[in-house]
Structures are given as structure tokens and as C-alpha cells.
Image (spheres, grey):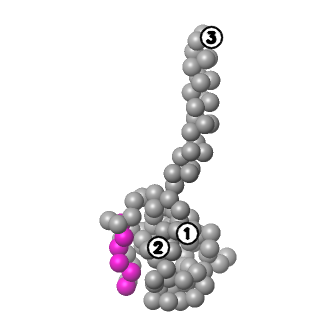
Amino acid sequence: MKKAMQIIMTASLLGLITSPAMADDMPDGAKLFKKKCKMCHAINKKKVGPAVINMSADADMLTETITNGRKRMPKFGHKFSAEEIESLVAFIQRNHAE
């Protein structure tokens, strides 16, 4: 029983240690936006595409639009990883006007 508790405690501790490192592995949405999206989108003004502050904040809609495209926006599902799309969605949501 004592050995089982030691194993559980060790596993729990490892989970606490690795979680912050995993967060650091997440792509930077701001950098990705600047590199791949800024040519068509600005934060607070319309360019070729809508301004970020005017975009929907719905995560599902943003993910769908980035992945599969919408109207004049091409699809990027084959160019971005799921993590990159998730980070872009988070970036858009943080910069969306409420």
C-alpha cells in the first residue's frame, strides 16, 4: 500500500512539473498572425479581410473558417497544425471587441 501511494504521488508530481512545459510548446498566436494573416487582416481596421475586432469570437466558427476557408478567405487547414489554429483562435478572441 505504501509503494502504491509513492507511485501515485510521483505521477502527480510529474504531472505538475510537465504541465507548464507543455504550455510553452503552444505556438504563439500573435507571431503566427503577424507572419501569416496580417497581409489580409488588421486588428482594428478592414483590409482585404475583416478587422479582428469585428470578427466573430465563436471558437468553433473561427476554427472552421481558418481550417476550411470562407468566402474569399482560402483554407489553411493543410498549412497550419491544430495547435497553430487553436493559438490563432485564442489570439483573435483576446483581440476581439466585446
Q: Residue at x 38, y 83 (%)?
A: 71
Can the viewer see residue 42 in this picture? yes
Q: Which residue is mark 1?
A: 30
Secondary structure beneath disc 3?
Answer: helix
Distance from Cα at disc 3 to Cα at disc 1: 48 Å
Disc number placed over residue 35 in the picture, else none: 2
Q: Which residue is mark 3?
A: 2
- Pointer 1: residues within 10 angstroms few (<14), some, or many (20+)? some
Can you say whether 57 is above or below 7 in the image?
Answer: below
> What percent of the width, then of the height, locates residue 66?
42, 71
Sequence-wise, the earlier of marks 2 and 3 is: 3
Q: Which dot, 2 or 3, sits closer to the camera? A: 2
Quarter of the rendering occupied by the C terminus: bottom right
Quarter of the rendering occupied by the N terminus: top right
Distance from Cα at disc 2 to Cα at disc 1: 9 Å
Callout 3 amino acid: Lys
Q: Which dot, 3 or 1, sits closer to the camera? A: 1
Can you say whether 14 is above or below 58 in the image?
Answer: above
- What range is drawn magenta here? 72-77
Callout 1 amino acid: Ala
Quadrant for residue 85, please give it: bottom left
